[in-house]
Amino acid sequence: MTKTIQEALRWASSLLGTAGADADGARYVLEIRLDWSPSQLQLHARDALTEAQWTQFEADVARLVKFEPAQYVVGVAPFFGDLFNVTPAVLIPRFDTEELVAWAAAEQGQATTGLDLGTGSGAIGLTLAKQLPSVAMTLSDVSPAALAVAQINANRLRRAVRLVESDMFAALPERFDFIVSNLPYISHAEEAVMDESTKRYEPALALYADHAGLALFERFVAALPAHLNAGGAAYLEFGYHQRAALAALVAAQLPGWQAEFRRDLAGQDRMLKLTKE
């Protein structure tokens, strides 16, 4: 027997709550499956699901109860007003990263070349390609599987970009006017306090780094002078507790460079801009 949307969500919330999983995931999968906005879902709360819709929702909730992220269940995640295809080969784009993209987009209107290093789904680089249409964007990643997802998104969103398989800068000999990167920055010591769905399903390659989460930043900072044009800027996202360590790293490895830190909407230090004075 089928249910109304309201009844279906109440059923899912009870099931997911008992399991300790995120009940909001059920609402998200219904919005995507029905192609409705949150307000539309609320307006139609008393509408009955069809048998096919109810069967699909039951299957989706069965995955959610195992802590699978809702974005992987339906295969898409929102970012900066677009929906991006996502698979377990890429991180799920987060709202916090939109702030990093907005910072770069606001300042790089005169740039001609940009790099999204460690692109994953392509959310950063493809958004910047839209926001800065005169910029030739390069998107790179060490993971061929991630690049395949980024290519799907580039094709679907009709964004003309260059994709390069590269371990950091290894296959990128050129310089860029700006570089944006959301590098892996989580220490393995933090795994015990991480969200269960992230630990189980999102790619470890894109999450964790050695040296208390700083290993990729160390490589990035060492290589940056050879890959940034004069007057250029690099924009980085980092963990809320890493500001002091990053400031010390930049001071030691990039003398004469300016480090500007910014806080996210929650008031945490989360973003860094590097420029040569």
Image: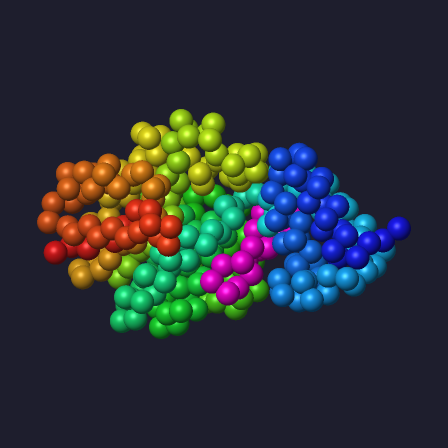
Q: Taking 179 as reference, is 251 left or right? A: left
Q: Taking 55 as reference, is 162 left or right? A: left
Q: Does residue 166 show up?
A: yes
Q: Nearer the viewer, residue 209 or 66?
A: 66
Q: Is residue 165 above or below residue 98?
A: above
Q: Does residue 174 show up?
A: no
Q: Is residue 76 magenta?
A: yes
Q: Position of residue 177 (x, y in %)?
A: 26, 61
Q: Taking 51 as reference, is 8 left or right? A: left
Please say which color scheme the image uses. Answer: rainbow
**Residue sitting at 73 percent across and 65 percent down?**
44
Q: Position of residue 173 (x, y in %)?
A: 29, 51
**Residue sitting at 75 percent across and 57 percent down?**
5
Q: Is residue 29 magenta?
A: no
**Residue sitting at 68 percent across and 62 percent down?**
41
Q: Quadrant of the C terminus?
A: bottom left
Q: Which residues are magenta?
A: 73-87
Which residue extends farthest right? Answer: 1
Q: Is residue 82 above or below residue 268?
A: below
Q: Nearer the viewer, residue 45 or 208?
A: 45
Q: Is residue 182 above or below residue 154?
A: above
**Residue sitting at 36 percent across and 62 percent down?**
102
Q: Position of residue 119 (x, y in %)?
A: 43, 51
Count of numbered circles on the image: 0
Q: Position of residue 95 (x, y in %)?
A: 45, 54
